[in-house]
Image (cartoon, helix red, strand yellow):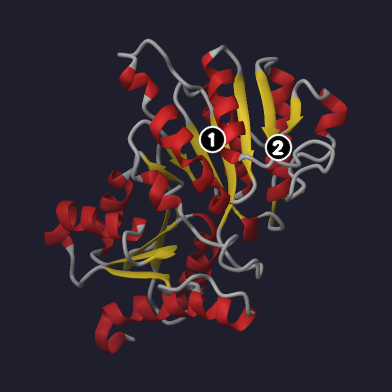
Amino acid sequence: MKTTYRTAVHDAIRDALRDDPRVVLMGEDVGRYGGTYAASKGLLDEFGPERVRDTPLSELGFVGIGIGAALNGLRPIVEVMTVNFSLLALDQIVNTAAALRHMSGGQFSVPLVVRMATGAGRQLAAQHSHSLEPWYAHIPGIKVVAPATVEDAYGMLGPALADPDPVVIFEHVQLYNTSSDIDSLAPTDICRSAIRRSGDDVTVVAYGGSLGKALDAANELSLTGIECEVVDLRVLRPLDDGTVLDSVRKTHRAVVVDEAWHTGSLAAEVMARVMEGAFYDLDAPVVRVCSAEVPMPYAKHLEQAALPQTANIVAAVQSLFGERS
C-alpha cells in the first residue's frame, strides 16, 4: 500500500494519542487548521481541544508549557512550525529541557517530543529554509533524530515518546509528499544508523532530506562501476559512529552529505570521527558536500544551486578515485 511520509507522521501522532491518554499535541495551527504541513489534519475532531491544542505564536511560551506538562506526567508532542522559528525556544530546549535531569541530580526527567520541519527546496527563503540540526546535535541531554523514510517517519515517534528525556524530531519539508509501498508500520530504532544500500567502494553518509539524493547518486555511480554503501545517520545525537566506521573500514573512502553549511556542520563532526577512528583504513581524504555558505535564496534556481544535489555527490565520489572518474 502506498503511504506518504505526511500520512506516516499523521498516523504516528494519531496512534500515540489513541494508545496513551497522557499524550497531548500542541503547537501553532495543529488543531483547526490541521497543521502547517497537514500532519495533524482531523485530530482535533477525533481527540478534542484538551488533547490537541492550538497555541499562540510564541515558541518560547508553548515549548515551556510542554516542558511543564512533561514534568507533571504528560507526554507532550510539541510542533514547531519550522526550525528557524525554534530559535525562539532555544532557551527552553537547551537551558531547561536538556539540563533538568542533570541539574536535579536525576530527580526529574522531561519526556518531551519536539517536532519541527527543516530544510529547503520549497522557495520559502532565508527565514524558513535552513538546516539547523547540527545546533541541536551539539547539546547533551537531548536526543536528536531525523527520519528520512516513511517507515521512520511513523516508527520514531513511539520510541521518542517512551524516552524519559527530550527528543527533537526533524522532518524535512521535501519529504512530506514522498511515498513508499508499505505493508505495515511499526516502531523503529532511534539508537542506530541504518545501511540503506550496500557497496564496497565508498561510504556515502547522509540523513534527512539528503538521503534520497545520496541514493540517486549511488545508483548513477553504479553504472560507472563504483558501488556506494549509503549510511542513513537517522540519529544525530547520540551519533552512531560505529556503523559509519564499520562501513568506512570496508570501503576505505567516505563522502558525507549534509544540507547544513560547511562551517560547524554535522558533516564536520562525522569527518572528524572517521579521522579519529578509521584514519589508517582510508585510501583517500574524506570529502563533504554541504550547502553554500549563504542565507538560503528565494529564487528557485539560486536555491537549487545553494543546496547539495545529486550531481555534487557524484562529483565528490568520483574525485576520490582519480583516473577511475
Question: Could you give the CA–CA distance between mark 2 and mark 1, rounded to whole angstroms?
Answer: 33 Å
Q: Vertically, is 45 above or below 89?
A: above
**Label 2 residue SS:** loop
Q: Is residue 156 visible?
A: no
Instruction: Between residue 68 and residue 44, name the one nearer to us.
Output: 68
Horizontal side, residue 123 vs residue 1: left or right: left
Quadrant containing the C terminus is bottom left
The residue beneath circle 2 is: 56
Mark 2 or mark 1, earlier in chain: 2
What residue lies at 28% left-to-right and 54% top-to-bottom? 269
What residue lies at 55% left-to-right and 20% top-to-bottom? 68
Q: Residue 35 in the image: state x and y as whole percent.
A: 75, 44
The residue beneath circle 1 is: 188
User: How many residues crowd around disc 2 within 10 Å: few (fewer than 14), some, or many (20 or more)?
Assistant: few
Instruction: Between residue 266 and residue 52, name the one nearer to us.
Output: 52
**Label 1 residue SS:** loop
User: How many residues crowd around disc 1 within 10 Å: few (fewer than 14), some, or many (20 or more)?
Assistant: some
Q: Amino acid at mark 1?
A: Thr
Q: Residue 277 in the image: state x and y as whole percent.
A: 17, 51
What residue lies at 35% left-to-right and 67% top-to-bottom? 262
> Residue 299 appears in which quarter of the rendering?
bottom right
